[in-house]
Amino acid sequence: MNVVLGISGGIAAYKAPDLVRRLRERGADVQIVTTASAEEFVTSTALQAVSGRPIRSNLWDKEAEAAMSHIELARWADVVLIAPATAEVMARIVSGGAPDLLTTICLATEAPIALAPAMNHVMWSNQATQANRDVLEKRGIHILGPGIGSQACGETGAGRMLEPDAIAAAVFSLTGAQIDGLLKGRKVVITAGPTREAIDPVRYITNRSSGKMGYAIASAAAAQGADVVLISGPVNLAEPPGIEVIKVESAQQMYEATHNVIRDADIFIAAAAVADYRPASVVAQKIKKKDEAMRLELVRCPDILASVAALPTAPFTVGFAAETDKVIEYARGKLEKKKLDLIIANRVGDNCGFDRDDNTATALWQNGEQSFPTCSKSDLARELIELVAQHFYAVRSADT
């Protein structure tokens, strides 16, 4: 697939070399077109090294434009991707302005166009930006993200560019191109995030899970060619592009959603932090504060992971064990008790595990284990998916 990658002038441009690598890993040929501002954030030397092509940036390049190169690139592209896409670039495309090579290509191409916005959360929520987004989507331009999280300015909110893996997977889904990955043609069901167990109409029991690890694993599985179904509890994360997302609230809803789609799944990865207990009954009206103490009766929630592992024709089943102490000991006990194929153990608590963009983990199976050092959750997810695929095929060949 031929991808014209436009890079505009946002700090997220530093991720561009990694995005190029992710696209090329999937077999794409990438031609980079930069704006003048982008060159303040990332060098042409680095971009040319990873893309293998000279970088285009100047609409007035006499040698290139003698052959009407902007038209040639517009026709060559199977998809035009702008990542990062600043508020300025979005506004230019909406207005039909073409003062530079990148926006000229957008006007001249008949290929699908995708934008991965990246900007401060206040800029993203501004009425003008949101109006421009609406116009772009109505014109058939695909908006990938943005995500929610910490930003370069030190603030937190919506406006963070999606991770390169997620963008690359989405780009291939736009054209219907088949990704030749380790999990090509495999159905992978993944749970992510917390659950909320209602006490009354305004209160609930939950936990600190952000869903970031599960979402990263879903993107990594899709990047390896899998047909991914992501069953998500309540999170403040953008839906991974090109992935079917089923949103739920409670453990019971997650249980039902899982069993509705698990029948033909090849792999099940239970990354969600599902509540162990829920209130025995939900009060219909808000509970008023009147007594010095209040007792809440709790009952067990359904064990989604154990129920999938116990199916007569169970998929390859992967669990997660988030522990504050005796991490490996408790994880191995869970592996054996629930008869899992693989379990991922990680320590959680203050300054580790939850509400962070990095993580560390140890994968355990019947006769072995493998540890992964602290890294970004997206990088860890890629390594975990490769390990899951390796063990999945080993079990599959043993069964045959």
Image (cartoon, grey):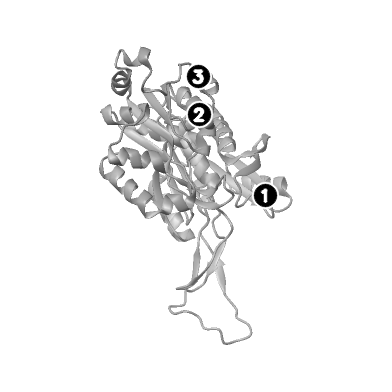
Q: Name the residue under label 2.
A: 39
Q: Which residue type does callout 2 highlight?
A: Glu
Could you tell me which secondary element the residue under label 2 belongs to? helix
- Point out residue 273 in the picture as x, y percentages from the top left corner: 56, 54
Query: For the residue carrying disc 3, how many other residues have a C-alpha within 10 Å: few (<14), some (14-19), or many (20+)?
Result: some
Percent of width and height locating residue 354: 61, 52
**Front residue of this view, candidates 82 and 282:** 82
User: Where does residue 19 sit, x and y in percent of width and height?
Assistant: 49, 30
Amino acid carrying label 1: it is Cys
Instruction: Give me the C-alpha separation between circle 3 and circle 1.
Output: 37 Å
Q: Farthest residue in the right direction?
A: 326
Taking the spot 44% from the left edge, 24% from the top edge, the residue there is: 26
Q: Do the residues labelled 2 and 3 touch (CB within 8 Å)?
A: no
Which residue is label 3 attached to?
Answer: 48
Q: How crowded is mark 1: few (under 14 residues within 10 Å), some or many (20 or more)?
A: some
Would you say residue 144 is visible in this rendering? no
Taking the spot 52% from the left edge, 21% from the top edge, the residue there is: 50
- Residue identifier under label 1: 352
> Which quadrant holds residue 71?
top left
Viewport quadrant of the N terminus: top left
**Can you tell which of label 3 and label 1 is closer to the viewer?**
3
Cβ atoms at labels 2 and 1 below 8 Å apart: no
